[in-house]
Image (cartoon, rainbow, N blue to C red):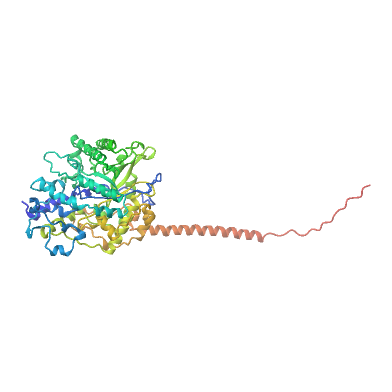
Amino acid sequence: ALKGKELRAARVSRIINLRHQSATCIIRVHVLSNRRFKGHLNTSTMPPSQPFRGVSLGGWLVFESFITPYLFTLTDCDVRGEFYDMRIGDRTKHTNSVAAEGINRNVVKIGNETKECTPLDQYPVDTWTLASSFASKEIARKYLTRHWESWVTEETIAKIASAGLTHVKIPIGHWILGDIRDGEPWVDGEWKYFRRAVSWCRKYGLQVIADIHTAPGSQNGFDNSGQLLSQKTARHWLSHPDRIARSVKAVGDVARTVKDEALDDVVTGVEILNEIYSDANITTVKQFYEESFEAVREYLPYATVVASDNFDAGQFNGFWTDSNKYKDTLLDTHLYTVFSEKLRAMSPKQHVAFICGNHYNIELMKCCWDDDGRSQGLGRIIGEWTASYDTLVGAEINVVFDEIANTGLAPKFDRKITPNEMSMLRNYVEAQMVVYEGRESGDTSGWFYWNFAMEGGVFAEWDFLRGIDEGWIPQVRREILAEDRFGSCETIIERTKDDYSVVHEFPDPKDLPPDLVEDRYFDDDVVMTHGQSLERDYRSQQIRYGIILVGIVMIFLTITRKWKRDSAQYRPLPDVGVEAIKPAPSL
C-alpha cells in the first residue's frame, strides 16, 4: 500500500487531466501548402468597434488546484475545523515576516498556541473531493466561505476596470442556487458573493458573463467540471437525460434569478456550459443548447448567449443562423499552446509566429458559416487564453503539492519574472490580442483571459493582474483595436528576440518517455524558420521591386535612344525657288 507522499503523488498525478489539458484537442495540425499569413482569409465582416476584452474570475466559486494550491493542501486540522492562516496565500502581502512568524500551511494558531498539523495522505483534486474532505458539510461551508469572502474583493474589480477591460466572466457551479441531491457533497451559499461581485462591477462599469462551468456527472472529466474523472469524456453527463435536464434547469434558474434580482443591467450574458468534451453526440449537444437558449431568453431577452465549441468549431456551421432569433449568440473557443510538448519547446519567435500563422488562422476560419457566407446569427469568441507558454500545469502542480506537504510552503511563491521574460511575454500577449480581436475579418468578437489572479508565483504567467502590474500585459484602450496599437503580427514577430534563455520547458523532454516527445515539424515556414522567412520574403520582395524598376528604366532608355536615333536620321527638304505665274491678260 502506498503511504504518505507516495499516496499523495499517486492521487495528484491524476491532475494530468486538468481542465486545460483538453486544450490540446484545439491545436489541430492541418496539412497545408506553405501559404504565407497575411491576416485572416475572410473579409466579409468587421468585429465590433469595441470587442469583448475580459478576464475570468476562475478558482473562486468553482475551484482549481493550480490556481489556489493552498486551498487544496488540507491537513487534519482543517478537516476538523481548525483552519490555516490565509495570509500565507496572499502574494501581495506575502513577505519574509510571514515565514519569520512561523506561519506555514501545516500549522495553525489557536490563541497563543501554535499547533503542528499533518497533511492528508490524499489531497483533494477538484471541488467534489475538496468539499468531501471535511468532517461535516458545515465545516466545509465555513472553510469555503473564507475563500469566497477573500479571493475576489472590491479591490479586485476596481483593478480589472482600471486595466481597461469591458467584461468579467464568473464561473459558477450548477448547484449555486441549491440543486444538490442526496449523496452530492456540493456546498451552496456562493450566490450572495456572485451578487456582491455584480454590484461592484456595476460600480466600476464592467459587464458580467455568468459562466455555468459544471454539469451533473461532469461534462468533460476535467477538474473544472467539479469532478476530475479517470478519463476525459462527456458521457457521464450526456448519456443521462435527467442530468441534461438538470443542466437546462440550472441555466434557466440563473437567468430567472438575474432578472428577479434586477442584475440584468450588469449580467448581460450567460454561458450555457463550459467545455463539453468532444466525444459528446453533437445532435444531443445542439438540442441541449437550443433548450438552454430558450431558457435564457425567456427571462433575459437581450442577453448574449454563449455556447462551448465542443472542441470542434466546424460542427456548428449552419447552427443558429437566424439573424433575428439568434442575435448576440457566440461560440466559445479556448486557445492554448502550453498543453502540447512540441509547442512548449518553441523559441520565442516561434511562439509568436504560431499564434499569427496557419494553425490558428485555420482554427478561426472553421466557424461560423451558413450557405450565404458568414453566419448572421452565431458568432465567435475566444473565451480562454493565457500568456503561459512553457510549463505544463498538470505536471508542475505535483511538485507544488509535494513541497507544501514536506515544508508547509509552496515553491517559487515569490518568484520574479526576469526583464527578458517580460519582453517575451509582452510580445506573446500583444500577438494574441491582435489575432483574437479579429481585426481583418471579424473572425471573433473578442476575448477573455484566463485567469485574473494566481496564488503565488509558480504559474505567474496565468496571472492577468500581475501582468498588468509588471507591464508584460498592456493596459487595454477600449476605443482602439490591438493591431492599431501594437502593429501587425509580422511586426510583432520581427521585434521578438529569439532568446532561448527565457524558455524553461517543463516537464523537461529529457525526462519524458520517447512517445511523449513530439516531432518539431510545423507546416508553416514562418514558424519553422523562426521568422527568418519573413526577412527573406522582404528581401525577395525588394529584389522583385528592384527588377521591375530596372526593367522600367531599361524600357524608358530604349525608347529614348530610339527617339534620338530617329531624330538624327531626319533630313530637311532642300529649298525650292518658286516663281509666281501671272495669269494671261484677258482678251
Q: Is residue 367 visible?
A: no
- Percent across and percent down for residue 502 are 26, 62
* Nearer to the camera, 502 or 510: 502
Q: Is residue 50 visible?
A: yes
Q: Is residue 194 shown above or below 487?
A: above
Give percent across and percent down for residue 349: 32, 58
* Residue in the foreground of this view, choosing between 112 and 509: 112
**Viewer-proximal residue among 577 and 289:** 289
Q: Is residue 188 left or right of residue 364?
A: left
Name which residue lies at 49% across and 57% down: 548
Q: Residue furthest left?
A: 1
Residue 343 location (% of width, % of height): 27, 54
Q: Residue at x 92, y 48 (%)?
A: 586
Q: Position of residue 291 (x, y in %)?
A: 26, 35
| Horizontal relation, residue 395 to residue 308: left or right | left
Q: Which residue is at the front of the view, 548 or 71?
A: 71
In the image, residue 443 above or below residue 88 = above
Q: How many marks?
A: 0
